Amino acid sequence: MSQEINLPRRRFFGAAAATLAATQLGLIGVAEAETATAKPTRLPAVKPGAHTSFGPLKQIDAGVLNIGYAEAGLVGAPAVILLHGWPYDIHSYVDVAPLLAAAGYRVIVPYLRGYGTTRFLATDTVRNGQQAALATDIIALMDALKIEKAIVAGYDWGARTADIMAVLWPERVKGLVSVSGYLIGSVKANEQPLPPKAELAWWYQFYFATERGQLGYDKYRRDFAKLIWQLASPKWHFDDATFERSATAFDNPDHVAITIHNYRWRIGLANGEPKYDDLEAKLAAMPPIAVPTITLEGDANGAPHPEPAAYANKFSGKYTHRTLTGGIGHNLPQEAPQAFAQAVVDVDRL
């Protein structure tokens, strides 16, 4: 009996080690195709920052975009889509992706609109950053990749996008991992003022409401992003190389326009597109999420975020929450990759 238990474990850890090594050599996908098999109960530990590259990226036309994305694992394996936030990029998942690929998943990590190698297909398309537009992009990506159903996981903009997908297209979402829980917003709800301390945390939202703010963000993209990283993750001591790997994503020609529109739209200073009105009306009702969900929070998250108790009743299906200790901040998947990847594996079993 001990052989029946230990042999699969040896196979898994051997597969994981091979995949991690392949990733470091820029060979992710090759090792995964040869070694990724059954999903383990517990994932091996990985040191944050152990990986620095996904290897060559891919591009695909999807909806109004040509989307750049990293991919790991077997094409026919159960799909996981990992969504980054602002002002971050796909490197938030550079340690998460190989863990999940070794565990038997097909992992897709796309650049959101306005980031990295993702581009609009038409020059006259509205550079729209509203929440429904971003979620529609990922559904279009799933359609383009012929992925019928996926586990969707994210933080910040990515968590909001994943939450929206789970509400509007639950048949496409097998499970949800959402950092900071239920982040679906409403322009109407955002008309109501918050207490001064909460408003202070949103200082950049008000800065972006001005022409000076738009010009300042455009001129000082890297300085601005680094400041947000430091404020949002005060105990994450990232180095310059780690920051620069992500900062190149902000050179996207639409990055400033998407960022500014996103924050102005939230507080009613910019219009959305009429084609999303029906979707936004559904979201404004703050509907519950019924798909299996694990929410995560870091104990040192310095970004604006709700307390877990405030959103627990927004998840009507199988649900659990985990708060990570040890100084974990806003960029949770990059700061605690093993815990984030483990949540993805676990939500698959809820």
Image (tube, rainbow, N blue to C red):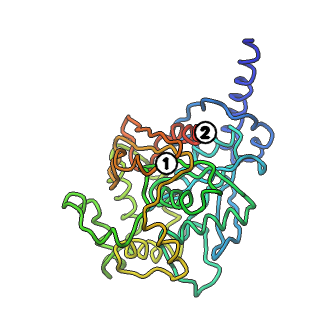
Query: Between 346 and 245, which is closer to the camera in this rendering?
Result: 346
Q: Residue at x 42, y 68 (%)?
A: 284
Three-letter residue code for mark 2: Val
Q: Helix or strand or loop: what does disc 2 sit on? A: helix
**For the C terminus, which image quadrant?**
top right
Determine whether 343 is above or below 6 in the image.
below
| Crowd class of label 2 (few under 14; some 14 to 19; many from 20; radius 10 Å) | many
Tell me, for residue 345, which label it has, or none: 2
Q: Residue furthest right?
A: 34
- Taking 115 as reference, is 215 left or right? left
- Residue 48 locus on image (x, y percent): 51, 40
The residues bearing labels 1 and 2 have C-alpha atoms spaced at a distance of: 20 Å
Three-letter residue code for mark 1: Ser
Q: Residue furthest left?
A: 196
- Taking 186 as reference, is 245 left or right? right
Determine whether 5 is above or below 140 in the image.
above
- Residue 178 locus on image (x, y percent): 49, 50
The answer to whether residue 112 is seen in the rendering is yes
Q: Residue at x 71, y 47 (%)?
A: 78
Which residue lies under the disc numbered 1?
Answer: 316
Q: Residue at x 69, y 57 (%)?
A: 56
Tell me, for residue 291, which label it has, or none: none
- Residue 324 locus on image (x, y percent): 41, 37
Q: Are marks 1 and 2 in contact (CB under 8 Å)?
A: no
| Crowd class of label 1 (few under 14; some 14 to 19; many from 20; radius 10 Å) | some
